[in-house]
Amino acid sequence: MRVFLKIILAAGLLLGLVRCDWGPTPVDEQSLVVEAFLDTGAPPPPVILRRTAPLQQGEAHLQDAASGGQVVVTLGGTEIPYEEAGGQPGRYQPTRDTVVPPQVAWSLRAEWNGETARASGRTPMAISIDEVCIDVPAQPAEAIQVDSLRRDSLDIPADQGYIYPIDVAVRWHARPVPQEIDSSTWVRAQLRPDASAFSSEVVEFFLEPAEIQQELRYPQADGARQWKGVYAVPVDSSTAPLPRHLLTTSVTRGDTAFASFAQTRTDPDRREPISNVEGGLGVALAVSVDSLSRSVADTLARDDRRRCWEPDQAP
């Protein structure tokens, strides 16, 4: 582990250097921007409409609200009209109480200022976490930490320190067997430790705190899919205890449009993620999300280094 963490320093520096000092491309004309995320089993979401504007008008005008538009969402053949929320320009709310059903065709149509934006797809089956297991080492490992805020210079400060690399395994209920041949369903698994002081882009990038791939590519056993990830918690010394922190493990199921958006939203070579909106910009997706949050403390490292939680267990 010690040698590996030293090797990733050089690769991390190269990653940071090639990503910096790139500016956006000017926007020449106004376009309608749509933002909507349908979640299976939840009420229809608000739909946000904005308009782009040339950069010369200043950043305050880049995402102006598109007020006075019309929005309709269709779920399995049932139309749900939307209306603009009072006092919230550009935010449109559903006028009908219902929930997003699984495995139905859906579509969205937004009209504003003579423009029409559309998106469509099929809602996924609901996803649910069965179990989350963590494995905390008894002692921290030696590592090199980099100040990632100064990646635009060759003078990047690096200090030798220590981290707890924490392995996490998450299991979720697998989809029915007849649909296993469907390669259009993707799942993103992600670890989100609530500890901003622990952040290190270089370490986290190489330790895989998140992954997205076709669901059928995740290992399956006993009716569940599984993914294993790692995140790191820096500490001051080789004898320092593991700081208590909250870990949120989440899984999101969606289609190929969701996968394209998730894979390109942090791509340094792109000005914006891939859009699935026809006649406009932005993103409108149908997904299913589940998460489990638990406190991780030093007692795990000292007494019981591996612990598993299920959704119905008390935190």
Image: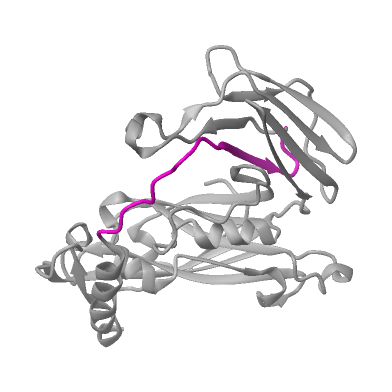
Image coordinates of residue 149 in percent, x first then y, are 20, 57
Secondary structure mostly seen in magenta is loop
Colouring method of the image? one colour
**Quarter of the image that includes the N terminus:** bottom left
Res. 96 visible in picture: yes
Would residue 172 be seen by someone viewing this image from the given angle?
no
In this view, the residue farthest toward the bottom is 3
Query: Is 217 on the left or on the right of 269, as rendered?
Result: right
Say whether residue 26 is magenta. yes
Looking at the image, residue 45 sits to the left or right of residue 134; the answer is: right
The quadrant where residue 175 appears: bottom right
**Residue under the image location 55 percent in, 37 percent down:** 31
Q: Residue at x 75, y 71 (%)?
A: 183
Q: Quadrant of residue 224?
A: bottom right
The reply to whether the magenta stretch includes residue 94 is no
Magenta region:
21-43
Is residue 185 or residue 303 the one in the foreground?
Answer: 185
In the rendered view, tell whether residue 182 sits above or below residue 69.
below
* Name of the residue lying farthest toward the front: 28
Dividing the picture into quarters, in which one does residue 83 lie? Answer: top right
Q: Is residue 27 left or right of residue 19?
A: right
Position of residue 225 measured from the top left corner of the image (x, y, whole percent): 69, 70
Q: Residue at x 30, y 72 (%)?
A: 15
Q: Residue furthest top?
A: 86
Q: Residue at x 69, y 32 (%)?
A: 110
Number of labelled discs? 0
> How far from the left and from the top, in percent, is residue 13?
23, 73
Please say if 211 is above or below 284.
below
Residue toward you, 67 or 137: 67
Across and down, in percent, residue 260 comes to: 60, 61
